[in-house]
Amino acid sequence: MGVRNHRGGTMGLALWRSVIASVALIALAGCALPHLVVYPFRYTPDQRAVTPPNLGLLLWLEGDQQMELDGVGRVTRWNDMLRGRDRAVLQQFGFKGTPVTTTFTTPNGARRHVGLRCAAEAGRCAYAARDFGPRPPPLNLTGTPYSILAVVVRRPGPRFDNYFLMTSGTSCNTTFGGTGCTANTVLHLGWQWDSVIRHGHYDFDVDSFALRPAEEPTLIVAQSGPRGMDVASLSAATAHSAFNGRSDPGPLSSSGLLLIGGTPFFEGGPAAPDWFFTGDIFALLIYNRELSLAERQQAADYLRNNYGPR
């Protein structure tokens, strides 16, 4: 059982009173609260968080100076911040997004950042994580706990199943649009519809809900492991917040490729869900372990100091 439908008009006492009141109500109802101890946002981000935790950092993407473009300005490769070209996400089957620059309001003033723009048609994205080091590790989330943090800006016109991070999974049926996958093999993280953010393992989902403008920058945090499965979000301007959790269904099995922005599904193509993302991605941190509360806050504070919200 989890806390859901938290939303606040301003980043103030109302948000925190809502959290405390919900905790009290659930406690009185006799529910276990393992995931509440990892609510990942501080009231004010710690200015000392100048880097995210590095232990178990499987993939670290930020757009500034890390994207490689083709001759017409589309992103072919997005390199890892920690390892450079030794680890990257590469475009699949010609599905390439474009760089987009946005100014963010942060605790340190206005900052401009480059992100990846994915659109429904020509700008549709599909990027797979690859490692080019001497001993390439498995860049997937099969059989392991994980923590994921992302800064996303949606475009107008929200649509159903708008996921910015997925895995290709197992036994997905291309004839029926990439559905029918084996349970607990496909990770999908993003908007299930409009204001509902979904963190799912295909048949095992957890949703959070918060009303927010379509183009508002959103910080999303998801975690899966023995502590539970949850998803939280925090947005700028009016500081909408949402959080929900559930018992974890167990680690992903046979999860396949780790895909950013969408899957490379097409007629006669690989057996992967045909989900794709419409919107902008500015930063993504993927860990192959559960972060502690302090580590989740450090990673979230690092992103908030650079992208907001305050």
Image (cartoon, rainbow, N blue to C red):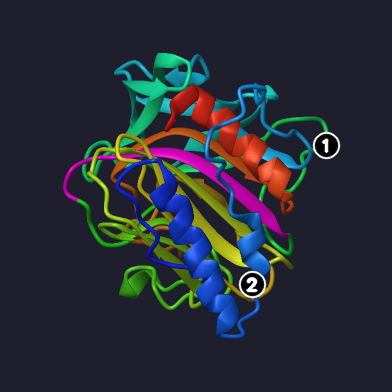
Q: Which residue is drawn at 59% across and 54% down?
A: 39
Image label count: 2
Q: Residue at x 53, y 65 (%)?
A: 186
- From the viewer's side, name the closer residue of 188 and 248: 248
Mark 2 secondary-structure assignment:
loop
Numbered circle sitting on residue 135: 1
Asked if residue 285 can be seen in this view, the reply is yes
**Amino acid bearing label 2:** Leu
Mark 1 secondary-structure assignment:
loop
Mark 1 neighbour class, 10 Å CA radius: few under 14, some 14 to 19, many 20 or more: few
Judge whether 11 appears above or below 21 on screen: above
**Amino acid bearing label 1:** Arg
Q: Which of marks 1 and 2 is nearer the N terminus?
A: 2
Asked whether 292 falls inside the magenta stretch, the response is: no
Return the residue at label 2. Answer: 33
Judge whether 75 appears above or below 6 on screen: above
User: Residue 16: image x %, image y %?
Assistant: 48, 52
Among the 4 quarters of the image, the one containing residue 207: bottom left
